[in-house]
Amino acid sequence: MRAIMYLMIVVALPLAFTCPADCVEEWTNNRIGISEVPPPPFTAVSANVEGSSTRISCWGRVYTLGPTGLPVQIRSKDADLLAAPVRLIAESEGGAVEWKSTGMKLVKSSQAQVILEGTAQSRIGKLDWTCTAEYDGLLRYDLQIAPSPGATIDKLEMIFSVKPEHAQLKWQPGVWPADRHGRLRPGEGVLVSGGADWYTWLGDLDRGLAVFFETDEAWDDPRRADAFRIERQPGSVNVAWWFIKGTKALPEPWKYTFGIEATPVKKTPGGRKWLLAGHLPVGTGNFVIPWATPRALRYFGYPKATNSRKYRRLVEFYHKQDIKVCPYVLLNLLSDAAPELSAHPEWTGNLVAKGKGGSGDVARYGDDLSAVVPTSEYIDWIVWKCDQFVRENDLDGMYHDFTMLMVLTDIPQGFGYMRDGKPVRCYPFFARRELYKRIYTMLKQYKKDAINIGHMSGCLYLPYLSFCDIIVTGEHFGGAHFQGKTYQELLPDDYIQAEIMGHNYGLTTVFLEQWGNLAPNQDHRFLLGLALLYDFSLWIGTEAEKPNQRVYKAFREFGAMDAEFIPFWRADDIVRGQTDEVRCSVYRKQRGGAMLVFFNRGKEARKMTFTVDWAKLKTQGSGPVVARDALPAGWDELVDNQLPVKGNQLTIKVPAEGFRLLAVE
């Protein structure tokens, strides 16, 4: 949450308000945001059952399930991810346990959801499984083993084997600069091990695989040093959940719920599609985020205008300039001033921010904020409340702060469990997912091009971020831990590839810059060059915004805002001569011509000659190729600075820790 408001909205003082709790029937068990038709841009999920094998298909991915319901192969973006089938491995009395399928049936098949159920038998007991697949490509598994009388088990684990070429990058929960986001370190054997880890993504620059669980109840000891591991073996990189170690009887029954999701989850338009409008009328963006102030929203982050008439006038002001309005709203936190809490105190958990005596946005209200327990009743209410807010004001989307997982321990309401007489926390992926899915669907039902924005800042959890058009990150670099750092230090390539760029996840990223506590006098061109190289956009709101505006003015004038993005790792057959320090990404227009971004990460300027396949840039006409500076050094106004092109050779000088933006026709 930002410490200063982004836009000042002048509206009137609060009016009288009737709590929806007085008329519960208006929102209880509503169906808002629930649909059997996937919202755009998602497409239908389908199942094809052939004997003991089932193929589940959705946009960009195919999951092939074996006779026990687990994937034997997962295909994403025309590549097979798995080096071996997903395996539930059990050992008993010194030998391996074999699971034999005893039945599988298709329980449901709609455009939005496919449900399969099956059973398998072994000498240690009966396995019942349910696989629920949804249109964004997430597979939820619910497993249960009913042990045979007197059966003991020596080992029980689940292993996901990923092909090494698709397990180059890793993302796990953790605070930067922990060895959890970025390139998977080299070497054979165990690379990562420790207690049960609730979320892991392995992938490459184009695709990946996430696996996760909500509770560690299935482990005999989730704190065991080998309860979780990532290991490299010949031909595979394995993620292993080691549930039971050492001879013991299974619980009656043993249960486990987990999820699998291959990425990318949807086609992303990239960072040029949506640009945050800054200081109008100077700004070049196409959407705006009216901030939470007492003059705007009735309570902090609460989806209700302080004065609806004047709020609608604000929306109309932006709409006349073709700018979409996506106001600041909270889904995972609730102000203690919200009248609903008097009727539903069970909705809120731990205090997150104190308004009274605090500072920043929350202090303007003087109300405390607490985390929300995402019960089905709360989800019904907040979706209904947001739907009202959107329709009353003709909004074009919403910006949700604190788009985070927020672990919970609320056993009476189904979040967490008891171990050794003590409550154990839960990672509420599926409840958060239901909330964000319904909000996303509600917005798309109102306007197909509505924008759902989640501010996650380092919390890259796909089960619910699938339902965001834009993710906002970068604010986590505003903490004291990063005092005096540079973005050159904070943003190595592998970190950007594993967390920020978004293309291998199916997300469009806006990076929120944090200059206040970092090293002074950093050149903004470094960060802007990275954004162009990887096709994400920047949220600035300062004088540094001016070069950002000029860059996208160049894109707009050249007609490349909707161009095909070809990242440097797939453009090396178009622009040959790239190095580890100097790279080139291409924005290719459909009808001919392209923008080339040459970025130099090095600390010295480089004059280099590149071999360019002009034909692959779809340049038009029979005349000579023309390449010119779209944005000259110095951030001056755009000029026609033609560069020398000799045959297929292009020679340019790229500034240190900066970039050149070339228009090619």
Image (cartoon, rainbow, N blue to C red):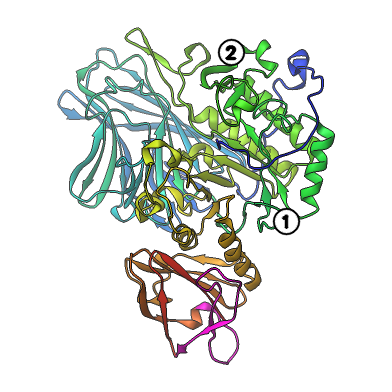
> Residue 505: percent from the left, percent from the top?
47, 49
Q: Residue at x 24, y 35 (%)?
A: 193
How packed is label 1: few (under 14 Cα within 10 Å), some, or many (20 or more)? few
Q: Residue furthest bottom?
A: 623
Q: Is residue 73 above or below residue 338?
A: below
How packed is label 2: few (under 14 Cα within 10 Å), some, or many (20 or more)? some
Q: CA distance from mark 2 to mark 1?
A: 45 Å
Residue type indicated by callout 2: Glu
Along the viewing direction, whichever of 658 and 141 lies nearer the viewer? 658
Residue type indicated by callout 1: Pro
Q: Circle 1 is placed at which residue position?
A: 281
Of labels 2 and 1, earlier in sequence is: 1
Q: Which mark is residue 174?
A: none
Along the viewing direction, whichever of 577 and 155 lies nearer the viewer? 577
Q: Which residues fall within the magenta stretch?
A: 617-646
> Residue 392: percent from the left, percent from the top?
80, 35
The quadrant where residue 636 appears: bottom right
**293 horizontally vs 645: left or right:** right
Q: Tell me which secondary structure the magenta stretch mostly adopts.
A: loop
Question: How many labels, in total?
Answer: 2
Can residue 483 be seen by looking at this rendering? yes
Q: Residue at x 37, y 50 (%)?
A: 495
